[in-house]
Image (cartoon, grey):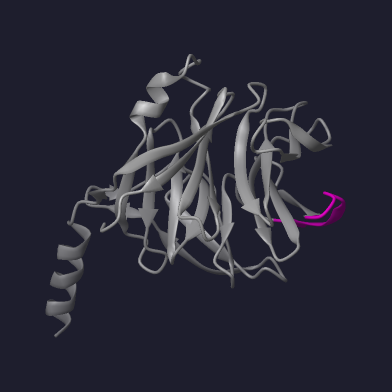
Amino acid sequence: MAGMLIACTAAADSTAPVEIGYSVVATYPHDRSSFTQGLVYAGGALYESTGLYGRSSLRRVDLKTGKPNVIRPLPRQYFAEGLTVFGEQLIQLTWRSGRAFVYTRQDLRPAGEFRYATDGWGITQDGEHLIMSDGSATLYFLDPKRFTEVRRVQVRDHRGPVTFLNELEFVGGDIFANVWRSPRILRIDPESGRVTGFIDLSALVARMEREPSTDVLNGIAYIPGSGRFLVTGKQWPELYAIELSPGK
């Protein structure tokens, strides 16, 4: 029986992810100065975390105009990273400071902070746990009250571990992840860590006049109940609403 289980697992791991088609259903302006590190849509509002030392911020953004209507700058020593919403709070990671900041969603007022031992890259939540990436192939599941690690999973496709996991979004029981400097968004099974599918956004990346080494695809937000994802990149002039093709 053990041999059968091992064989079945190996066979599952060797299955290549399927490509998930998409269509662009809307295009919105995006602030070209925003070094996008995290996006989340909640309560009818778009929130964005922007990075770089001395330029990092948390913003509430008008989707139609791309202009921020509230900006909360971070102290100059912090490089902001991923962003998620949990209840009525926003949680924003920082890159190498081991510190996350908590804000009230209504007015972006500081409401606490917590520490972690890894780099901070992306963050999302599944309704029970916070889920965090650190640029490796590992996703960390955290208790949202104590901010302690509950479990971790290694993300793998048919070739092996997938590193440089960045911005995250949890939708319909799956984790969607940007991969640093890749035009693809991965769909990941949160229990096994297996990559089950990918969205190839090369066509959107090709539209951009950008610095290839820095102005990469990054930022995923899901509009609840709409079937639409919002995607953009670091210092991109546009943000796109896309719908995924059914059946995969």
Q: Position of residue 217 (x, y in %)?
A: 47, 32
Seen at 81% across and 30% down, the residue is: 76
- 124 or 159: nearer the viewer: 124
Taking the magenta stretch, the answer to whether it contains residue 112 is: yes
Q: Residue most toward the bottom?
A: 1
- 135 or 246: nearer the viewer: 246
Q: Position of residue 185 (x, y in %)?
A: 40, 43
Question: Could you tell me which quadrant the N terminus lies in?
Answer: bottom left
Taking the magenta stretch, the answer to whether it contains residue 58 is: no
- 21 or 15: nearer the viewer: 21
Question: Could you tell me which quadrant the C terminus lies in?
Answer: bottom left
Q: Position of residue 177 (x, y in %)?
A: 45, 48
Does any portion of residue 87 appear in the rendered image?
A: yes
Magenta stretch bounds: 104-115
* Total number of numbered discs in the rendering: 0
Q: Position of residue 103 (x, y in %)?
A: 80, 54
Does any portion of residue 117 appear in the rendered image?
A: no
Seen at 26% across and 58% down, the residue is: 247
Seen at 59% across and 23% down, the residue is: 235
Seen at 30% across and 52% down, the residue is: 197
Side (left or right) of 198 relative to 233: left
Relative vertical location of residue 104 with respect to residue 238 in this rendering, above or below: below
Side (left or right) of 41 relative to 24: right
Residue 219 occupies which quadrant of the picture? top right
- 73 or 165: nearer the viewer: 73
Relative vertical location of residue 138 with respect to residue 240 in this rendering, above or below: below
